[in-house]
Image (cartoon, helix red, strand yellow):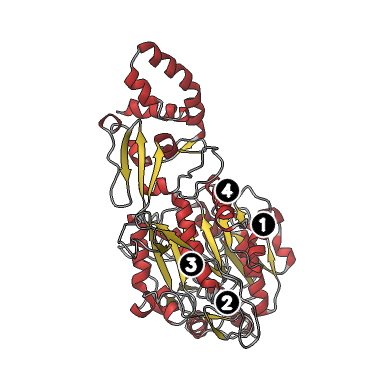
């Protein structure tokens, strides 16, 4: 029998009082921080309702396939009942006479079957990551119809407010957009509370600074996270260009050697990785299996990071995105291994449980607070008793992300917010003896510690060695705010898509068709300034530029 954490026991008792003893409402809300243990709490509530003969069947709806698999495993460990994973292709699922779980995406296709289950049997519906169920969105409308006759509905969330401000089904909201569900029908555990109770690990945010110098045909434009790019006068009339040249967009721009294939070791992403790699080294003195997660904005950047990790660390990471075979299997392989890095594009997010993850490099295409908090939830899960590690989030020093990070930091108590720095000892993974940092073997059991290569950076001014996290030289005070040089074409392009100008496939094709004709006409006109200016734009942008200029 699984021993519940105190908060899970409290949530169980409160839910039974609300749903069964008082019969106040058929909905109960658990709003608990990512990684706090909502799945086990919900399975225990389901088990209690089954034991009291209040329900016959359980249906779980979760965000994605990998999470559904985890639900089935946890449900069986708590209830000793099998849970069948179903999709829209399964047809009449009622005939299986089993508890079932499915993704939110499958709800509409299975709506008649779910409806049949809820009307014929006393059903508990468990909605995981409930923010997916917006009232006016397809998933929310489908869920509202399919589960209208469910006997009980258990609503689970760690990030209850949608970034688009839309309301979710089955919940009431106040005028400010906050959830207005009765306190007696809600159990809340904030991230700060979860950290103080050691259910989650405290997080430290590294704001990764840098200065991008973008070359406009010899004229340099500086872009940092603290100020917008000041464009040359002749380019200010193109609003899409201003959007493209923001710090976060440039932070997501890959930089290659002259061969166009090899990542630059001194590029912005490389310096983020080096910092994350150092933190992973530090963490492995306490948790030898600690791993890192890189969330990339696109498949191209994910593959770029794969090459970069190989260059910096000499080990190929596991990569998952929608174009690789068996991504769920690869995530599970990473979970069971001691590999250092997992690179993901929209595959390792809400609900995915890899307790050994401790370092996050955040370069996601999603810049919402909900996505940011969900990503943090991947690296703050406690890895069992005795886990005294911290989670480290490496992110661009960008106002929007810094505001999100500040909110998370403020939820933690002052003692947990402070990073004590490196530990004075390292822990033997075999016998858990605290050993001297310089020890090559454990004095008690003889375990041989892996040899650690020190990582430092040299000051270009005085050549003194410094830690990778140093923002200025510890000897001479020289600033380490790195400068990164890009051409305009590099700044705008990621593959065939021009960043910030929202070039779709249709515009790409139109731009390529226009390019030759436009260049020929400009050459004929003899306008050298215009020709030089247009040379800085990839031909794929011509269609979009044409539309923008028509709007002026």
- Image point (33%, 39%), residue name: 242
Residue 75 x/y as whole percent:
64, 74
Residue 363 in view: no
State the residue position of label 2: 40
Along the horizontal axis of the image, is 54 left or right of 218?
A: right
Which of the marked residues, 2 or 1, is nearer the chain's N terminus? 2
Counting other residues with Cα less than 10 Å from the Cα at mark 2, is it few (<14), some (14-19), or many (20 or more)?
many
In the image, residue 542 above or below residue 474 = above
Which one is in front, 156 or 369?
Answer: 369
Alpha carbon distance from label 1 to label 4: 31 Å
User: Are dots 2 and 1 in contact, CB under 8 Å?
Assistant: no
Alpha carbon distance from label 1 to label 3: 41 Å
Image quadrant assignment for residue 536:
top left
Which of the marked residues, 1 or 4, is nearer the chain's N terminus? 1
Which of the marked residues, 1 or 3, is nearer the chain's N terminus? 1
Residue 171 x/y as whole percent:
43, 66
- Image point (48%, 76%), residue name: 200
> Which label sits in the foreground, 4 or 2?
4
User: Are dots 4 and 2 in contact, CB under 8 Å?
Assistant: no
Along the horizontal axis of the image, is 7 left or right of 347?
A: left
Q: Secondary structure at mark 2?
A: helix
Give the number of the disc on residue 279. 3
Which of the marked residues, 3 or 4, is nearer the chain's N terminus? 3
Counting other residues with Cα less than 10 Å from the Cα at mark 3, is it few (<14), some (14-19), or many (20 or more)?
many
> Which label sits in the foreground, 3 or 2?
3
Alpha carbon distance from label 3 to label 4: 22 Å
State the residue position of label 4: 303
State the residue position of label 1: 87
């Amino acid at each position: 029998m699984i021993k519940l954490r105190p908060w899970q026991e409290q949530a169980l008792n409160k839910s039974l009082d609300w749903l069964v003893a008082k019969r106040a409402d058929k909905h109960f809300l658990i709003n608990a921080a990512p990684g706090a243990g909502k799945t086990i709490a919900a399975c225990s509530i389901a088990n209690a309702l089954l034991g009291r003969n209040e329900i016959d069947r359980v249906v779980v709806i979760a965000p994605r396939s990998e999470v559904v698999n985890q639900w089935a495993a946890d449900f069986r460990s708590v209830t000793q009942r099998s849970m069948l994973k179903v999709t829209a292709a399964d047809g009449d699922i009622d005939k299986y006479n089993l508890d079932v779980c499915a993704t939110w995406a499958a709800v509409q296709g299975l709506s008649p079957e779910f409806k049949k289950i809820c009307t014929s049997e006393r059903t508990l519906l468990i909605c995981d990551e409930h923010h997916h169920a917006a009232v006016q969105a397809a998933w929310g409308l489908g869920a509202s119809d399919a589960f209208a006759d469910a006997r009980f509905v258990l609503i689970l969330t760690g990030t209850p407010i949608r970034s688009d401000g839309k309301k979710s089904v089955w919940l009431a909201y106040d005028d400010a957009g906050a959830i207005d569900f009765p306190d007696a029908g809600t159990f809340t555990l904030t991230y700060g509370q979860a950290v103080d109770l050691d259910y989650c690990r405290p997080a430290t945010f590294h704001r990764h600074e840098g200065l991008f110098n973008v070359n406009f045909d010899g004229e340099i434009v500086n872009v940092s996270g603290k100020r917008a790019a000041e464009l040359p006068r002749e380019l200010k009339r193109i609003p899409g260009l201003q959007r493209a040249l923001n710090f976060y967009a440039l932070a997501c721009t890959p930089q290659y050697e002259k061969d166009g294939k090899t990542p630059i070791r001194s590029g912005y992403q490389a310096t983020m990785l080096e910092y994350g790699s150092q933190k992973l080294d530090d963490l492995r003195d306490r948790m030898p299996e600690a791993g890192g997660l890189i969330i990339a904005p696109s498949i191209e950047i994910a593959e770029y990071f794969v090459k970069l990790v190989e260059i910096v660390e000499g080990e190929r990471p596991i990569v998952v995105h929608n174009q690789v075979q068996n991504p769920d299997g690869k995530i599970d392989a990473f979970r069971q291994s001691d590999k250092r890095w997992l690179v993901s594009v929209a595959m390792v997010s809400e609900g995915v449980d890899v307790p050994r993850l401790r370092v996050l490099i955040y370069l996601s295409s999603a810049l919402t607070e909900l996505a940011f908090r969900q990503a943090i939830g991947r690296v703050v899960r406690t890895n069992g008793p005795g886990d005294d590690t911290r989670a480290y989030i490496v992110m661009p020093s960008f106002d929007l992300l810094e505001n999100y990070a500040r909110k998370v930091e403020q939820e933690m108590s002052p003692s947990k917010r402070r990073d004590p720095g490196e530990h004075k000892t390292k822990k033997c993974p075999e016998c858990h003896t605290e050993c001297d940092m310089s020890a090559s073997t454990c004095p008690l059991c003889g375990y041989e510690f892996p040899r650690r290569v020190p990582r430092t950076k040299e000051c270009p001014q005085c050549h003194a060695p410094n830690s990778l996290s140093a923002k200025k030289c510890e000897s001479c005070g020289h600033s380490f705010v790195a400068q990164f040089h890009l051409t305009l074409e590099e700044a705008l392009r990621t593959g065939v898509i021009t960043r910030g100008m929202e070039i779709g496939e249709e515009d790409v094709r139109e731009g390529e068709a226009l390019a030759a004709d436009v260049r020929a006409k400009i050459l004929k006109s003899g306008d050298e300034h215009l020709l030089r200016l247009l040379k800085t734009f990839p031909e794929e942008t011509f269609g979009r530029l044409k539309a923008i200029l028509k709007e002026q």
